[in-house]
Image (tube, rainbow, N blue to C red):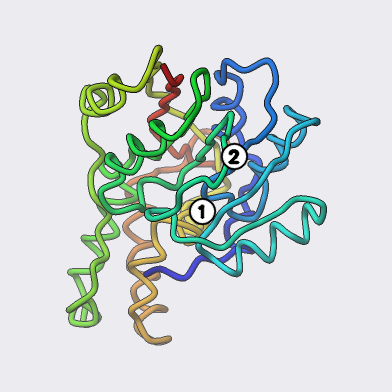
Amino acid sequence: MAVWSAGQYVKFEDERTRPARDLLDHVPLAGARHVVDIGCGPGNSTELLVERFPGAKVVGLDSSPEMLAAARKRLPDVDFIEADIAAWRPSAQVDLLYANAVFQWVPEHEAVLARLLETLPSGGVLALQMPDNLAEPTHLLMAEAARSGPWAEAYAGHDVARAVLPAPARYYDLLEPFASRIDIWHTIYNHPLADAAAIVEWVKGTGLRPWIDPLNEMQRRDYLAEYTRRIARAYPPLHDGKVLLRFPRLFIVATRR
């Protein structure tokens, strides 16, 4: 299991929070009494929920103690719970289950999403977004770099590759028996970043973690150098010297029947 770094994650907080904001804009609730932020991370998405639903009980849920520590520091008046997302069930009726960029890491998450939607009361909403970027150079080059050097043997016995997301139709068919309405869409963000090294810093907070965690200090240094070299080739500088990080994301908002 990757070790998540709250400090690394928030280096690009504005860019990471934009899809969280876009997801929340599509939640069809005028008000809410009980909201759960599943995979709350360092609390940036939870903060949006507190602002959107000021009268609601908002709870943050995550499996990472470091992320939860950062979230509690950020929002000391909000309850944060450490839990296994795959096994967690709400203990009371919840109006909104909100999940920003977490279910792509949950094994067999399609069945988990159907189960969670089924637990909601009529009119309750399940809203989530997941990166759908495994075909992007950022992620293809993680695997290429892993196979290219003497560190390759360090991955034996480690499950490092994230599963490709199913087609939108798969999610629709799973959720439709419990939903009165389902919205599914993709958004492709194009983030201007300083240079190739900034792209590497971005993915070090999320997708690159499973690839660097199995390595010792020297292997990690050499792997990152090789990966950065490949990223620089794949993302050439723009007119102003910056690079453009293309980032597709899948959004789903389902309302309980």
Q: From the image, tell me which residue sits under label 2.
A: 15
Tell me where residue 212 appears, x and y as whole percent.
37, 72
Q: Secondary structure at mark 2?
A: helix
Which residue is at a point 53% across and 65% down the rendered structure image? 64
Which label was assigned to residue 239? none
Could you tell me which quadrant the N terminus lies in?
A: bottom left
Mark 1, Cα crowd under 10 Å, few <14 / some 14-19 / many 20+, is many
Could you tell me which quadrant the C terminus lies in?
A: top left
Tell me where residue 175 appears, x and y as whole percent.
31, 25
Of the image marks 2 and 1, the number of the one nearer the N terminus: 2
Judge left or right: residue 126 versus residue 45.
left
Q: Give the amino acid at mark 1.
A: Trp
Which residue is at a point 33% across and 43% down the rendered structure image? 112
Q: Is residue 249 visible?
A: no
Q: Is residue 162 visible?
A: yes
Residue at mark 2 to residue at mark 1: CA–CA distance = 10 Å
Tell me where residue 118 appears, x and y as whole percent.
38, 31
Which residue is at a point 48% across and 51% down the rendered structure image? 199
Q: Give the amino acid at mark 2.
A: Glu
Q: Quadrant of residue 157?
A: bottom left
Mark 2, Cα crowd under 10 Å, few <14 / some 14-19 / many 20+, is some
- Residue 111 versus residue 169 in the image, above or below: below
Which residue is at a point 57% across and 34% down the rendered structure image? 94
Q: Quadrant of residue 109?
A: top left
Which label was assigned to residue 202? 1
Q: Secondary structure at mark 1?
A: helix
Judge left or right: residue 172 versus residue 117.
left
The answer to whether the residue labelled 2 contacts the one labelled 1, judged by CB atoms less than 8 Å apart, is yes
Judge left or right: residue 30 versus residue 8.
right
Judge left or right: residue 150 versus residue 243.
left
- Residue 97 versus residue 125 in the image, above or below: below
